[in-house]
Amino acid sequence: MPSSSQPARVRFAPSPTGRTHLGSGRTALYNYLLARQTGGQFILRIEDTDQKRYVPGAEEELMNGLRWLGLEWDEGPDIGGPFGPYRQTERRNLYAKYARQLIESGHAYYCFCDSPKIDEGDAPGERHKHRDVCPDRDQLLADADARISSGDDHVIRFKMPIEGSITVTDAIRGDITVENSTLDDYILVKSNGLPVYHLAVVIDDHLMEISHVIRTSEWLPTFPLHGHIYNAFGWDQPIWVHPSIFLKPDGKGKMSKRDTEALQKEGKSIFLGDFEGMGYLPQAVVNWMALIGWSYDDKTEFFTLDDLIEKFSLEKLNPSPAAINFSKLDHFNGLHIREMDSADLANLIRPFFEKDGYQVDDQEKLEQIAEVLQIRLAILDEAPEKAGFFFKEAIHPEPESLIGKKMTSGESLAMAGCIRELIASLPDFSEETANQPLRDQAVELGLKAGHIFGFLRNAITAQKVSPPIFETMTIVGREKVLERIDKAIAILENLGNEN
C-alpha cells in the first residue's frame, strides 16, 4: 500500500447524471488538498458509462463549479494527460480486455440469464442471490464463447467466492471484514458492452496509478466487491478513504430530492452552480465544505485554500455523518468578505445591484459603498437591500417614519427645519465634523440624539436600517442630502395640512 507521505495521485471521478452538489464538491476538495499538499497530481475523470442517466450540460457545469472553487486539475478530459482518455466511454476497449482476463482466470463468467435486471446491475441485499440460481456460473468457456458467437445476449458477472471472507481497510475506519456468503455475483459488464462502475473504476484507478481513493461512505456497501476485483487482478490497492455523508440541516437523514426542492424555496441550495448567484464567495464555500467532516483543531475555523493545503490531513477526517449548516456558510462568507480588498468587493456586488435594476455607472461611488458595507454583509445579494437607496434618484419615506417618537408631526417639522439649516452649514459630513453639532442641537431642542439621527436616516435612506449616517451622507452628497431633507419636510408639511 503506498505511503501517504509520498506525492499523491488522486482523482475526482463524477458521473454526469445531474447537477453537481455540495457532497461532490467536498470530495473534489479533499482530493485536491491532498494532491497539492504532497506535491502530487489531481485528476478529473468523467465516469459516463451510465448513458441512460446522462444529462447534457452536466459535465460543463461540474467543471465550471470546480474552477469557481479554485480547484484546477492537472489531468482531465479537457486538458488531456499521460493516462488518457479521461472519459470512461472512450476507454471501452480497455474494459473489454480486462473483463476477458477475469473470465479466463476464473474470476468472472458470461451470464445469459433472461432477467429484467440484465442491463441494470444488481442491487445490494437482493433476497435471492443470483449465484445460487444461475446455470451459467460454471459453464465451460468454450460453450459460452459459442453462444456469444451465435448472438445470445449476455452480461459479465463477477464470480464471488462462496466461502471465507474479505478484509478491506479504510484509512479512517480501520479494517472492515465481510463474509463472502453475504455477497453476490455482481454484474461487471452490461449487455451493451459497457462496464458498470465497479469494474471500470478499479481498472481506471489502477492504470492511472491512483494512490488514494477519497470517496464518500455511500460506497462502503460495495467496498468489499472492489477489494475482490483488485485481488482477482493481483493488483495493489490504493489507500481507501471514505469521509462522512452529508445529512440534511435538521440532522435527520440524507438529503432527498424533496429536501433539495424545499431548500430552494427558502433561497438555499446544495448545488455548486447556484452559490455564486446567491451571493457566496468561493473561498467561503471552500472553508465551509472543508469543515463538514474535517477539523484542524477545536478552535480554528477561518481557512483560505492555501491554509487548507498546508493544514489538511486524512487523519483528522471524521467518519460520522455531518449535518449541513447554512448559518455557518453565512458566517464564513461574512468573514471572507471582511478580508477582501474593498475594490474587489465593489466589483462583486455590482451585478447584484444591476440585477435589481440599479444603474451603476460611478465606480468611485460603488467602492465607497463597498467599504461601508464590508463589515455589514453576510451575503453579497444583501447589498441592494442595504444600499440600493444610494443609486435612486428619489426615495419615498413613509410619512410616519419621519415623526419622532412621542412627537407630533408639527414638532417633527420644526425639528426637521433646524436639522436642515445645520446640515447646510456643515463644512463636511464626517463624524468628527457633524456628530457633536447634531447632538448639541438635540439638547437645544430638548430632544434625544436618536430623534435627530432617526429623522436623517429615514429622510435620506427611507430605510429602518442603513450604514452609518455620516458615511451615508458623504456618499449621497450634499446636494442630494439637502434635496431629500427638503422632500421629508414637504411630507411633514402635508401631514400638518391634512390635520
Image (cartoon, helix red, strand yellow):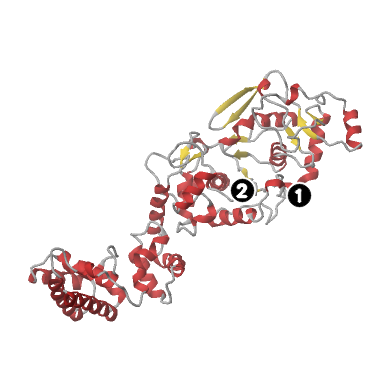
Residue at disc 1, secondary structure? helix
Q: Nearer the viewer, mark 2 or mark 1?
A: 1
Alpha-carbon span between mark 2 and mark 1: 20 Å
Q: Residue at x 38, y 70 (%)?
A: 367
Q: Quadrant of residue 214?
A: top right
243 relative to 309, above or below: above
Residue at 25% over, 68% down: 457
The residue type indicated by label 2 comes to Phe
Q: Residues within 10 Å of mark 2 (few under 14, many from 20)?
A: many
In this view, the residue in front, 6 or 369, is 369
Q: List x then y, in percent, for residue 4.
A: 58, 37
Q: Position of residue 70 (x, y in %)?
A: 54, 55
Q: Which comes sooner in the sequence, label 2 or label 1?
A: 2
Relative placement, left or right, of 426 versus 474 is left
2 and 1 marks in contact (CB < 8 Å): no
Viewer-side residue, 304 vs 1: 304
Question: Which residue bears the numbered disc 1?
Answer: 90
Please identify the quadrant where the C terminus is shown.
bottom left
From what the image shows, is residue 265 above or below residue 249? below
Where residue 215 sits: x, y (%)?
59, 39
Q: What amino acid type should be assigned to the residue bearing mark 1? A: Glu
Q: Percent x, y for residue 360?
A: 43, 74
Is residue 480 or residue 71 the one in the foreground? 480
Q: Which residue is mark 2?
A: 42
Q: Is residue 52 visible?
A: yes
Residue at 55%, 28% (x, y): give it: 174
- Crowd class of label 1 (few under 14; some 14 to 19; many from 20; radius 10 Å): few
Image quadrant where residue 3 sits: top right
